[in-house]
Image (tube, grey):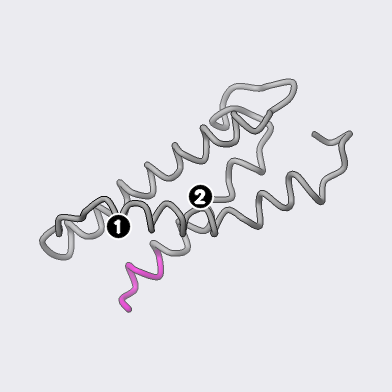
Amino acid sequence: MTASMYILLAVALIAANLPFISRRLLWIFPLRRKHFGHHFFEWLVCFGLVGLFAYALEAGSSTVHAQGWAFYVVVLCLFAVCAFPGFVWRYFWRSKHLA
């Protein structure tokens, strides 16, 4: 694996957990209470940003390969697995008065 792959994996792991850390919507707009829909929307935005970053890394190093739908489903599932620590911290370990 090259250094860009390790960087991409680290960025994906951090980005998958970012929605569960902040109480703000998209880290800008303050909310009284952030529910699962807000977290899911932010998680999808982070998925898109990581995808754009991966595309830029691939385009910079070689020709971009075409992918089918199965690739994107697998990548989405892996991104969900990366988000598991943040999800557990937000919904299972934090006390209700901090939500």
Where is 26 relative to 51, above or below? above
Q: Which residue is mark 2?
A: 15
Foreground mark, 1 or 2, reads: 1
Q: Is residue 13 left or right of residue 33?
A: left
* Extreme residue in the front direction: 70
Position of residue 50 measured from the top left corner of the image (x, y, whole percent) = 38, 49
Q: Is residue 28 left or right of residue 53?
A: right
Q: Which residues are magenta?
A: 1-7
Quadrant housing the C terminus? top right
Is 5 magenta? The answer is: yes
Q: What secondary structure is the magenta-colored segment mainly?
A: helix
Position of residue 36 measured from the top left corner of the image (x, y, whole percent) = 65, 33
Please give the name of the residue rendered at 38% of the width and 43% of the height, measured from the top-left corner: 49
- Name the quadrant containing residue 98: top right
For numbered disc 1, what is the local secondary structure?
helix
Where is 17 relative to 8, above or below? above
